[in-house]
Image (cartoon, grey):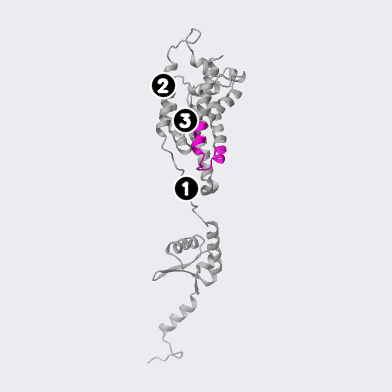
Amino acid sequence: MQNFSNGKSPEQQATDDAARAEPAWQTIDPQGVDRRLIGPLTRKRARLWALVLEARGLPYRLEQQASRWQLWVPEKEQLRALDELHRYETENHNWPPTLAPSVPLKSNSLITLSLLALLGIFHNLSGLNIPGLHGPNIDWLQLGNADAGAILAGQWWRAVTALTLHADGLHLLGNLLIGGFFIDRLNRELGIGRGWALVLLAGTLGNLANALLQPLNHRSVGLSTAVFGTVAILAAHSACHHRHSLRRRWPLPLAAALALLGLLGSGGELTDIGGHLWGFVAGLGLGWLSSLLWPGECTERRWSNLLAGLGSAALVVGSWLMAFSQ
């Protein structure tokens, strides 16, 4: 016969001793972590908080009672756990950020392709022996190339006419295939008139800047200066459009465009690296400026596109007329 002075068996006494030795546990109140949280702790947030505590080396217990989740920590660690979870919620508030709405695209690819095809037709016609007004055949490359010395002497129109000329069929094909993709995208975002106006301006400014920095005997032709300007315009538009959702990573579109410039714009013995670079720089400026001027849809878009398109066509035709008048 056993006599228990405290009225408990050894097994019960051992259980009570273990309970007293075990630290008290407290549940984490979601509102104690962040007052903006409403309602009980969700399964997703409970598991996320558990990972935070585990990463910080804090003991925890995660329990589910019916449809409710509870996160427990030792009483002596409760204040530290609340502080760690509060800091985590503060640093990650509104993350991931809401994505900016996608830019509505126009259905004008057929017009863009037609104008690019017109550039190919012009290349074929310029290779024919067409007599000029005064007898000899027209040397289109000589008449319209971006001659740095001639541009600095006042023949600024060469910066425009050079964009419509190409050294050979392969040169033309490369610009049409690669450039057509980016030009079409820009035109679908901004409209045919605005898109082509920016493409033309980027190429023209790039050729003018290149003429200022190259030797006087430097000559170049091709649409590629405008193509890399278009890449930069699209990158600048993307960076401006997604600047809130990308936060500190807003330069990512610009970095991607620079990588493309290095990949496609710096190879080849006859590649005009300066033209590509300055077209790209001009495109960055034009892209940023146009993002401020045309941040979104506006009621004047149709008329502004029409005026921009007519102005672009007039600039190209006028430049060639000035070239023939020399």
Residue bounds of the magenta highlight: 288-308
- What distance separates the C-alpha of mark 3 from that of mark 1? 30 Å
Q: Which residue bears the numbered disc 3?
A: 264
- State the predominant SS element of the stretch in magenta: helix
SS for callout 2: helix
Residue 81 seen anywhere in this rendered image of the structure:
no
Q: Residue at x 45, y 30 (%)?
A: 179
Does the magenta portion include 302?
Answer: yes
Q: Which residue bears the numbered disc 2?
A: 121
Q: Amino acid at mark 1?
A: Pro
How many labels were placed on the picture? 3
Q: Amino acid at mark 2?
A: Ile
Upstream in sequence: badge 2 or badge 3: 2
Q: Where's the N terminus, which quadrant?
A: bottom left
Q: Amino acid at mark 3?
A: Leu
Q: Which residue bears the numbered disc 1?
A: 101
